[in-house]
Amino acid sequence: MKCVALVSGMLFAAALLAEPIKVACIGDSITYGTGIANRETDSYPAQLQQRLGADYEVRNFGNPGRGIYLHSWRGRERRGYRYMAEHQAALEWQPDIVICNLGINDNGEFIKKERIRPGTFAEDYKRLLADYQALPTKPKLYIWGKLAPLAPGQKFYRSPEPFLMQAELAKVAEATGAQLIDMQEPLRPLLMTAFPDKIHPTAEGAKVIAATVHEALTTKPEPPVALPEDIAETAEVWLCAGQSNMFWKLGWCSQADQEAAATADCDIRLWDFMSGKWHQITPQNAKDWSAMGVSFAIRRAKATGKPIALLYVAAGGASTESFLSEEVMAALDRDGKTKYPNLLKIVTNRKQIHENEDYPCKWCAREYPKRKNNKTEAYWWALNKLYREGIAKIRHLPLTGILWYQGESNATVNVAPDKPLADDYMLETLLAVIETLRPNKDVPFLMVGLPVMNRPWEPYRTAQQKACRLTGAIYLDTFGAGLGEMHNVHPKNKIPFVEMAAEAAAKAVK
């Protein structure tokens, strides 16, 4: 009898193991499949089922018009998804995975409600997810951290609210352990073709959504970037960011042999955003990395006796806009007014830089389509690209300071005639990049001023100085010191620039 009972138990356990993994897609009309003729086969949950196969069971719990806010009404009925029958049905089904797409229908209320009670959106979202976290199945949670884009002509197209929501969605994910899914970038190329009513994607758009969710479900998330264990408690940590003059390799500079040899007496580690890996800088490989970064690290190591960890994010030709987070570009001040009106126009345009009529860096916009597959430069020029692929991955690390050498792409229109950009725009980009990169005002921000050259850069230098005065950042007056070359945008001798930065760092680091 014991044998029979044991076998029966094993068969029962095997049957349990064979049960499909339950995936609940909760959300609004995009999840429901509004506008798609054959919802049963072409909505994104249906197409996700096709991709996942028989080992999964995917159910669609979408309800058009629903949102996050619990105190929100749609006519005479509540708008909050938490009050809906679909929410209750999803809970009763006890899923193993929950994918939540909500937020678009909170447009129009977000700014108003957050002014009255900041954090309400995030708190209401956490309450919704808490219902699923309380289930016996303890489902894995996924939320759309960047919502599907709205097409030109839609009521809330170019509204700052979806971008401001992203910061709150990130807080929700951090608090709940949910994994964020970016639905904006995958759908952006279809913006003009797959959104016939300006908000609801076609079956083609749903296919992209299903593919994006499938990738999130089946790809192991990258572990967060960590400092090397042996120096984590003792190292100075410097973010070295910018465009070609920060990217410029030590091996391309004068005094390269001398500088490379000096690394033998220093413990310098460099995290490269392109590979996502740490490298020990040695005399043998030093010439392959940033001249500004490596030479600066040598001087900090010798001055402090500490290991130096460089967080290196730079690409040739990159404009400031690539380093900015969308949330900062759409930010409001304490009075609820737009902080950066010119940047808001660009980020809410939702188009690529060569299609975005508000993007003033015409050289980047013109060259981007031709060079976008070049992984050392134009690939990184797209709006917010260097932020997403570089800065966002290291924001959690404790910074000693920031060394910023960028501006050539933002100083002029960069097409003949070569004339400066508008003063207010130049200042906005500088203020916004300081806000994006610096975690707090106690972290020194060293801004390398544009040096001597036969280009009309004086207005940009003026903007750099003003931005530093307003924020407490440190302006390195390379022009006043006579640094640079009149006919070369890439000065070969970087040592005077580095020594100016190292001297400022010695005074600023407490």
Image: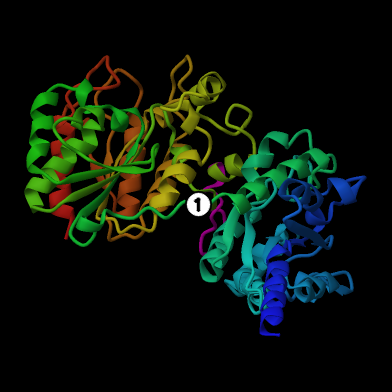
Q: Is residue 268 left or right of residue 224?
A: left
Closer to us: 498 or 379:
379
Which quadrant: the C terminus? bottom left
Residue 366 in the magenta stretch? The answer is: no
The answer to whether residue 498 is seen in the rendering is yes
Q: Is residue 484 above or below residue 441?
A: above
**Residue 299 in picture, x, y percent from top left:** 11, 42
Residue 336 in the magenta stretch? The answer is: yes
Q: Is residue 493 left or right of residue 179?
A: left
Q: Residue at left 56%, top 53%?
A: 338
Closer to us: 83 or 497:
83
**Residue 204 in picture, x, y percent from top left:** 79, 38
Q: Residue at left 43%, top 31%?
A: 318
Q: Residue at left 28%, top 27%?
A: 248
Q: Secondary structure at mark 1?
A: helix
Q: Which residues are magenta?
A: 328-342
Q: Is residue 126 above or below residue 312?
A: below
Closer to us: 251 or 436:
251
Query: Which residue extends farthest right?
Result: 37
Q: Amino acid at mark 1?
A: Val
Badge 1, how many Cα within 10 Å: few under 14, some, many 20+? many
Q: Quarter-wise, where is residue 152 in the image?
A: top right
**Residue 302 in picture, x, y percent from top left:** 7, 46
What's the magenta bit mostly, secondary-structure-wise? loop
Q: Which residue is mark 1?
A: 328
